[in-house]
Image (tube, rainbow, N blue to C red):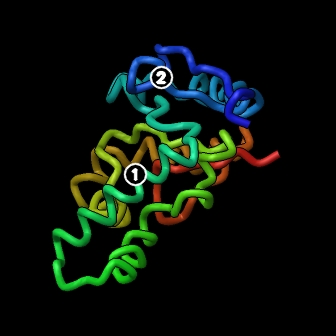
Amino acid sequence: LEKSMVKVESGICTDGGNERLAPETYEAFKALYAAIPGHLKAKDSEYGKLSSGFRSYADQAVIFQKAVEKNKKANPKLTQAEAEKVTRKWNAKPGTSAHHTGNAVDLWMGWPMSSTNAKKMSNKKGPQYQKHGEFWEWLKANAPTFGFLPYSSEPWHWEKWK
C-alpha cells in the first residue's frame, strides 16, 4: 500500500512537500484546495494546505507513543493502560488510523491541531471561531462535493470516500 502513495506537491503542503496520499485522494484534494475562495486564502495563505496525509504503521506508533508519554507526564498516576485509553480519545492506535490508507487528510485550519483548539472551535462566540470559523464553515459546506467527509471531533481531519 505504501508504495502506491503519491507525493503531494510542495505548494499545497504545510511542510514543503513531504506528504503522500492515495492517487485518487490526491486528485480530489488538489481540486478541493483549488476551490478555496480567494478571500479566505487572503486571510490565511495556508488555509486548506495538507498538514498530514499517509502515515505508515511505524509513523503512527511514534505519534501514539509520544501522546501516551505526554498524558502520563501530565498525570503520573495513570497506568499504561489508562494513559493509552486517554490517548485514544485523540490519537488512533497504530493499525487503526485512517491515515494508513492514504485517504485521510489533516488540513491547516489557521491554528495548531490539538484537542484544546478543537474544543475552542465549537464556541462560535469565541475568538478562535471568530477568526477561523468562516474557513471551517466553507469546508463543511464544500468538502463533501469533492468526496471528503469530516471526522466529527477533529475539525482538521477529513476522509475521502468513494
Residue 135 vs 96, above or below: the answer is above
Q: Is residue 114 left or right of residue 150?
A: left
Residue position for label 2: 18
Are the two marked residues, 1 and 2, in contact with CB atoms closer than 8 angstroms?
no
> Where's residue 132, x and y in %?
34, 44
Q: Disc 1 or disc 2, which is closer to the eye?
A: 1
> Where's residue 110, x and y in %?
33, 39
Which residue: 31% across, 56% down? 66
Give the quarter of the figure containing the C terminus: top right
The label on residue 63 is 1
Give the quarter of the figure containing the N terminus: top right
For badge 1, the amino acid type reads Ile
Residue 124 seen in the figure: no
> Where's residue 38, x and y in %?
47, 21
Q: Residues within 10 Å of mark 1 (few under 14, many from 20)?
A: some
Tell me the SS state at disc 1.
helix
